[in-house]
Each structure stands twice: as C-alpha cells, then as structure tokens.
C-alpha cells in the first residue's frame, strides 16, 4: 500500500501521518484536543450539538475511501489529520529552488515565512465556523442545515490540518500559535481574527451562500497556491483539503442558484415581468434579483481585499523561495521562475484606473486575484442561465474590482460597480443602490424562518436538483435533538 | 466484449460547479474541461468510479445508454444534458463497475454473442453500491445444502439488508470482496454470486436475499490444498456477521415476467442458484400463466446436488425436474446433455415454440455440451440450431452464464 494511504483510527486522532509512532507530536495534539473540543462547544454551531447530522467523514485519502456518510453528533465527528499521498521524488516546482527535491522539513531560512502563511490560513478556518454559528436557527431546510454543518466540521478539520503542521514542524512557537488559534474570536473587539472578511458577521443564509461562494473561494485559491509548495507536508495537506473545499464551493454556488431559481419561478407564477420591481417581488416572499446583486457586490468586494496589495514583495519572496506558487502552477507552461517576466496590473494613477506592466514576481497577488475573478465568473454564468431560461432580461454581474475596496490600489478611490471613478459624496449617494442597506437586511431577516420538516423548503429557496449521497431532497438530513 | 450499445458516463452541466475534483481524481485522465464544461472521454473512462464519491454535487453520476458515444466536442457545447436517446431497455450493460463487468462479460461469452434481456423482463437496477460504498448485510442463515458425508460443501447463505434498500431481480449477481489484504498488500478481487432467491426475498416481502456458495478447497498437483478466499470467508460466516455487499449487477441474464413463457434451465452445481430464484418467483405467482419450467440439473450424486431435498417438493405442473447424476455407484455416468438427448421429443417441441427462453448456468464448458445436444435435437425437428440460437439471443431468449 502506498505511503500515507492507511488511516489509523485506533488513537484519539484519526491520521495517516504515523502519529502512533510520533510520541512528541501525538502528545502535543492530545493536549491541544480538549481545548479544541471546548472551542467547538462554545463557538461551533449553536443549539445542534446533540443532533444527529448526516455527515461525510473521510475514512481514507484514496478516492474510494474518503467519503463515508452516516449520522454523527458533531462533537463526536472524527476530526483527523489527513494528507494526500506522498508523490515519490517530488521536486520543487517553481522559484529559485526549482528542480530540487521537495523539503520534508522546514528550511531554516524560510521558517518565519512558512509559519506566518500557515497561521493565516489556519486562522480563517475556525473564524468561519464562528461567523456561521447562529445560522442553524434559521435554516431553510434540513438539507441546508446539513450542508452548513458539513462545511463547519470540515473547516474544523482544516484547522486541525494547520495545527498539525505547527506542532510537527515549528516547536514551541508552533504550539503557541496553535493555542492562539483557539483564543482569537471572529469580530471580537480585542482579539479579532487576522483577516478583515473573517470578522464580518454572516447574518442570514443568503450571506452564507455568498460567503461560501466568494470568500471560501479565496480559501480555495490560497490552498491551490499552497498545494504547489516546495514544503511537501504543506502541499500534501492542502491537496487533501481542496477535495473538501469543493463541497463548500458547491454549497455557495448551488445555494445562490436555488435562491435565484425560486425568485424567477415565483415571478413567473405571479406574472411579474419587471425584474426591477422589488416591491412586487418581495410580496411573493422571495429575495428580489436587485437585492441578490447587492449581496454579490458586497461579498465579492470584501473578498477581493483578502488578496492583499496588487504589488507585493512578500508574495514575490514566497514564490521565489518555493513556498507559495501560482494557481495550478503545475498546469502553467513557462519557466516557473518569472525572473524578468512582466504581468499586467490594474493600478490607480492620479485617481484613474490604468493597466500597467509590472514585474511578474511582484504581481503575484494580482495574478491570483485575476484567476479568482475568472473562477467566480463560472457560477454567475450559470445563475444567469436560470434567469434567462425563465425569460427575464436581467443579468447578475460581478462588480468592477475597484468597487468598494479597503485594501490595495483602489482603497483610496471611490468607484462604482462599473468601474467609473467618482467623488466620495457621489459614491455615498448611490451606495444604497449598490450595497445592501438596513431595509434590505430587515427584509431578508424577515424571511429567515426555520423549516425543519424533511422535504420542506422555505419560501425563498428552491429544493436542490440532487440530494447529498444520492439521497433525495426529502431525506431527513438532520435528526434534531435539542 | 465491450461493444455498442454502451453505457456512457456524462457530467450534468447544470449541476456541475467546475471544482475540478473529478479531473484531479481520475486515474486515467478521462475527465477534461474547457471554459464551458467538464466532460468525460468515453474512449478513456474505465468505469472505475473513483470520481463519484469526491464529487460534491452529484453531477458526476450520470449515465446514458448510447450506440455512438457523445464526442468531447458535443459535450463541451451542452448547456444541459441531452435526453436519454431512444434505446431498448434491454440494451443496458450488466455493470458499470469495470471489475464486475469483466467478470460478467467473461461469464456470458458462452452465449456466442451480445446477450439481451428478455423483452418482458423487469428493469434491473445495477451498481447501486460499490467498493467505496458497499451495502452492509447481516447473515441470518448459513446452512449446508449438500450431504454431510460428501466432499462438496455447498452453502445456502441468507443476507439481510435491514432498512437498506438493495433491490435485485432473479438472475442478477452481487459482488463480495473478502475483507483484508492479499500477500501483496492489495485488497482482494471481487467475486460475484448469483442471487438464489426471488426478488421479494427469501420469504415474500423480506428484505433479504440468498446466495449459493461452494467452499473451494482443492488439492493441487503439488499436494498443497488451495482454499478459495471468498468462498471460505462466506462459508465460515456465523449468524449475525456483517457482510459488505456490492452491486447488484447483471442486466441480461434475467427471467421473463411473461408468465406464459416456457423456461428451459440447464445447470450444474451452484449454477442452480439463479434457477432457484426463477422457480421460486414462478411458484409464488401460482398458476397465473401457462408457462412451465424445465430443469436439467447435473451433479455427481444426489447428496452433492444443491437443494436436492426442497426440489423434490416442487409440483410437476410447475416444473419438470430432470436431476442427472454422474457418479452414482453401480450406475452409468450420465450428464445433462445425455438426459436432454433422451428427452428429444419434449425439447424438440419446446424449441419450435416462439416463447421458449433458454438459460445455461454452471461450470465453463457446460454450454458446449448443451449446445451440441440442442443442435441434434433441433435438427431432429427440422430446425437449424445456430440460426435459431442467434434469433433467440437477439430476442433475449438465450442466455449463458458459465465460469
């Protein structure tokens, strides 16, 4: 059997990293474990810790074994440490160490850089669980409730994955960082999570779908870039995490699609022809298309800030060092060291948005953001197909990357969703047309009533086309015990 | 062999979210994509099913039966799946699981051509459970059905599925992978066992099924005893044991639901398993139709003939039982084809009927002897067996499953 294909389920922590033989790390993790469970009980999904949830658990990292479905109480979920199987003779795919054997230990010179990347990635995982902890109370169906919890337990597992790396490779520093990952709290005034978007509330289910579509997709891009890493344990960890991350993408993508589907269906049934007639749409108990667009504008722009500055020496250093690659580096056909290459970057010059060639190494954040925007488009195309099929002349669209930004080139200017630069007063006057306001929030909030009968769905969302694990939409995905 | 029509693997573009998991997972590079769709190359897909569990959406789990697989270009252009092309339901392959498909493909080769299900057969469900996601059954019966004094240890094993649905038709097979690893550290190969009970269970409306398992324990030329891993695993199962079951498989070796159809069943040893299912199905439906069953069943001795006792109790008006023995002391050796020749008049009359369905099941080679006998019998009533066989096969009325 290839290395790393066996999962050890006997110990407290399921793993395929040989924890049984690694006394030091096992002890460290077993010491960390009670704190994690405490955190999960305090900050995990509120009110459903005793319920039986039909969850997917990885019982192996090979394709045949990693999706096992059964009813589980969330605190008893088997959070494990699972790395994609090692690829024999893997070499560093980019940067100045390109072609050297991938590192199995942390190279001393990159210790601080790697630790920082792992901690930042790790911090987002518990943060999103915290952001979503109240959503169970208003789930539009048992199916959606289950999907929320699947996302939550897997974010928990991703935290484990990062904490394992910290304990295994970063000694005392790593232990302290692992501890702090359990101490910070999303949105907390004194001890907030590290990145802005992870301190925003997720107040309703449309926000949740938008968050999983847009913000978890940033996570996917980061994981894809780290999966290319020359530090092999990080690469293997991220590769396995990506398989799980795909489910999160699905929840967001299909969630928004079902909202759109329900809205246009209700409009058709009621004979509404004007998609901009918000009042009429809202009378139907569905979320009107303009509001869906506003939510997109908000979540897309908040997420773009996560990519950092367009021109970044940190990103250049991480690439050059072989630590963090480009999105699907292995599929790109170039020299993989980028010395002397350029990349077009959108910059803000004298209050205008212009495209400039910049050194490709410095522009890696920009490039990853471009890949991200392209990846985001695919879902929007499908959502629009639903609207088109229903016969409405309305198109959802991603706003311009300069819209509503707080980090990077466009933080200092005000641009509309179409990219037109304007003064702050003009922008503020229009903000309510572009971003959800208090009235929108109150309306959406009024729709957030829980539906807990198997096969029933809230008024504002269509049932899924296919269920989970070949079960139907009317399967009892959560057996609620309160 | 894998010949048209084929079951083609497609991805539903309306449900797919382009997460790339399938493409990253596929071990043979059969999944690819363009800016529009993720698609499966029918020329490369080997039905290994690796891409199915990791898909978060369920879009990956789509199958159509086609004569000409959809090209990559066609799939790239889709906004939604095309409707299932008009095909006879009888055209479906026996399994999507390549391991099971190979086994059944080999077992069906003796039919001399592409087999089809009887026109009146019920629609089978296949591949509901695979290695990654097997059904779990509990052993609720395991009894020896051959004489205690004989070398042949054949078991009737009942597997109960509890609350889990595992729909089968008579003639279908289930897959068993013995637990543990072989000496190379690989999981064991799958073995197929024919369902020996009727579609509604051992007793009507029970959620179980029976299989007939012969314990393989053979002395080899070098003096060592070869023990079959799967058969010994199954034969030793205690009541209450959990068994992982894959399948069901098989979409052609099915019985006609037409109760007026006569059925000729020829078997040896555990090849009797599907015919126990056929017979039980007909018995339960009482005298609703005109069709009769004709069974030619060979064994070494009565003690070694599986289900010898229960068979005796079946009424002649339901089934004409021809039990044939090759090793009874003091008697000449007789094989099923000998008995068939002796009954040329009956069988010749049957061959002239439009509605006759013929099934042959047992050890490899049985079909050759039976073929020769039927050829002579047909000639005796002025029929050309080769031509008739081809007609019957095309109509789903001639079936061979030997191994």
Image (spheres, coloured by chain):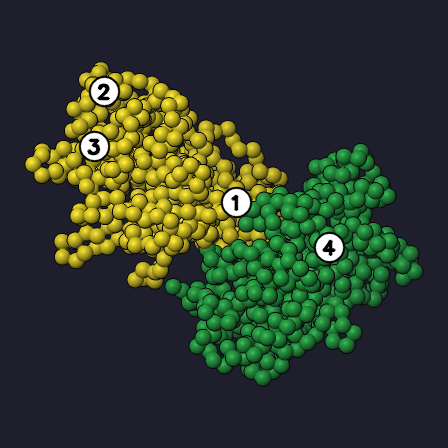
Chain colours: A green, B yellow
Q: Nearer the viewer, residue B196 or B9?
A: B196
Q: Residue farthest to the bottom? A: A172
Q: Which mark is residue A138?
A: 4
Residue linked to disc 2:
B346
Q: In which quarter of the image is the N terminus of chain A?
A: bottom left
**Eyeballing the image, is A55 above or below A123?**
above
Specify whether B65 is left or right of A323: left
Q: Tell me, yes or no, whether dots 1 and 4 are on the same chain.
A: no
Which label lies toward us, 1 or 3? 3
Q: Tell me, yes or no, whether dots 2 and 4 are on the same chain.
A: no
Q: Residue B61 carries which label?
A: 1
Gap in Å between the C-alphas at discs 2 and 4? 73 Å
Q: What element carries label 4?
A: helix
- Marked residue chain, label 3: B
Q: Nearer the viewer, residue B51 or A221?
A: B51
Residue linked to disc 3:
B323
**Eyeballing the image, is A376 above or below A361?**
above
Q: Quadrant of residue A357?
A: bottom right
Q: Residue farthest to the front? A: B313
**How crowded is the residue under tag 3: few (<14 C-alpha within 10 Å), some, or many (20+)?**
many
**How crowded is the residue under tag 2: few (<14 C-alpha within 10 Å), some, or many (20+)?**
few
Specify whether A268 is left or right of B261: right
**Eyeballing the image, is A231 above or below A481?**
below
Q: What element carries label 3?
A: strand
Q: Tell me, yes or no, whether dots 3 and 4 are on the same chain.
A: no
- Marked residue chain, label 2: B
């Amino acid at each position: 059997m290839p290395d790393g294909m066996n999962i050890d389920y006997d110990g407290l922590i399921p793993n395929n990293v040989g924890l049984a033989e690694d006394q030091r790390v096992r002890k460290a993790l077993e010491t960390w474990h009670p704190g994690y469970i405490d955190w999960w009980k305090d900050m995990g999904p509120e009110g459903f810790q005793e319920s039986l949830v039909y969850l997917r658990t990885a019982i192996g990292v090979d394709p045949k074994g990693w999706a096992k479905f059964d009813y589980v109480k969330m605190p008893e979920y088997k959070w494990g440490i699972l790395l994609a199987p090692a690829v024999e003779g893997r070499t560093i795919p980019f940067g100045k160490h390109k072609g050297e054997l991938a590192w199995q230990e942390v190279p001393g010179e990159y210790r601080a850089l790697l630790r920082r990347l792992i901690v930042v990635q790790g911090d987002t995982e518990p943060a999103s669980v915290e952001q979503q902890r109240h959503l169970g109370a208003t789930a539009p169906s048992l199916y959606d409730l289950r999907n929320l919890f699947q996302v939550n337990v897997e974010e928990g597992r991703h935290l484990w994955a990062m904490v394992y790396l910290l304990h295994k490779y970063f000694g005392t520093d790593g232990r302290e960082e692992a501890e702090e990952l359990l101490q910070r709290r999303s949105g907390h005034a004194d001890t907030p999570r590290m990145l802005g978007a992870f301190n925003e509330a997720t107040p309703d289910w449309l926000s949740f779908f938008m968050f999983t579509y847009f913000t978890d997709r940033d996570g996917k891009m980061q994981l894809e870039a780290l999966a290319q890493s020359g530090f092999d344990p990080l690469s293997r960890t991220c590769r396995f995490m990506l398989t799980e991350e795909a489910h999160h993408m699905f929840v967001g993508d299909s969630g928004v699609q079902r909202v759109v589907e329900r809205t246009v269906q209700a409009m058709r049934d009621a004979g509404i022809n004007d998609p901009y007639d918000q009042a009429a749409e809202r009378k139907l108990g569905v979320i009107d298309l303009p509001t869906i667009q506003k939510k997109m504008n908000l979540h897309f722009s908040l997420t773009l800030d996560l990519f950092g500055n367009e021109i970044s020496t940190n990103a250049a250093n991480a690439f050059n060092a072989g630590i963090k690659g480009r999105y699907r580096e292995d599929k790109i056909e170039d020299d993989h060291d980028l010395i002397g290459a350029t990349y077009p970057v959108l910059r803000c010059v004298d209050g205008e948005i212009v495209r400039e060639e910049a050194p490709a190494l410095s522009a890696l954040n920009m490039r990853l953001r471009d890949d991200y925007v392209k990846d985001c488009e695919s879902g929007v195309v499908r959502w629009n197909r639903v609207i088109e099929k229903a016969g409405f002349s309305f198109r959802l669209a991603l706003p311009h990357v300069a819209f509503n930004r707080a980090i990077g080139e466009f933080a200092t200017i005000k641009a509309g969703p179409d990219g037109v630069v304007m003064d702050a007063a003009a922008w503020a006057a229009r903000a309510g047309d572009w971003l959800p306001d208090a009235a929108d929030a109150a309306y959406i909030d009024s729709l957030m009533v829980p539906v807990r009968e198997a096969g029933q769905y809230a008024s504002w969302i269509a049932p899924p086309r296919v269920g989970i694990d070949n079960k139907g939409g009317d399967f009892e995905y959560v057996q609620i015990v309160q | 062999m894998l010949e048209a029509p084929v079951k083609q693997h497609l991805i539903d573009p309306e449900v797919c979210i382009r997460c790339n998991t399938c493409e990253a997972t596929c071990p043979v590079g059969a999944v690819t994509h363009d800016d529009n769709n993720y698609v499966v190359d029918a020329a490369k897909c080997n039905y290994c099913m690796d891409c199915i569990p990791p898909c978060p959406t369920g879009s990956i789990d789509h199958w159509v039966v086609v004569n000409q697989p959809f090209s990559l270009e066609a799939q790239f252009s889709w906004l939604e799946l095309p409707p299932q092309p008009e095909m006879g339901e009888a055209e479906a392959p026996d399994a999507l699981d390549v391991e099971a498909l190979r086994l059944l493909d080999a077992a069906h080769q003796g039919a001399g051509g592409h087999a089809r299900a009887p026109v009146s057969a019920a629609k089978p469900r296949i591949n509901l459970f695979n290695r990654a996601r097997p059904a779990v059954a509990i052993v609720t019966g395991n009894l020896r059905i051959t004489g205690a004094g004989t070398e042949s240890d054949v078991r009737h094993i009942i597997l109960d599925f509890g609350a889990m649905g595992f729909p089968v038709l008579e003639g279908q097979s289930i897959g068993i992978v013995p637990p543990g690893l072989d000496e190379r550290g690989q999981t064991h190969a799958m073995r197929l066992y024919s369902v020996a009970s009727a579609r509604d269970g051992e007793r009507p409306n029970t959620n179980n099924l029976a299989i007939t398992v012969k314990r393989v324990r053979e002395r080899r030329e070098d003096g060592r005893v070869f023990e079959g891993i799967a058969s010994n695993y199954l034969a030793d199962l205690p009541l209450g044991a959990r068994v992982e079951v894959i399948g069901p498989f098989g979409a052609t070796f099915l019985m006609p639901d037409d109760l007026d159809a006569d059925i000729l069943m020829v078997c040896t040893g555990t090849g009797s398993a599907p015919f126990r299912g056929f017979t039980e199905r007909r018995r339960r439906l009482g005298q609703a139709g005109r069709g009769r069953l004709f069974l030619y069943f060979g064994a070494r001795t009565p003690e070694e003939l599986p289900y010898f006792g229960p068979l005796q109790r079946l009424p002649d008006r339901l089934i004409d039982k021809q039990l044939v023995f090759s090793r009874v002391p003091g008697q000449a050796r007789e094989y099923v084809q000998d008995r068939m020749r002796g009954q040329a008049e009956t069988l010749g009359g049957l061959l002239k009927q439009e509605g006759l369905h013929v099934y042959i099941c047992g050890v490899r080679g049985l079909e050759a002897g039976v073929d020769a006998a039927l050829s002579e019998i047909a000639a005796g009533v002025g029929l050309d067996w080769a031509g008739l066989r081809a007609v019957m096969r095309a109509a789903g009325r001639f079936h061979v499953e030997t191994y």
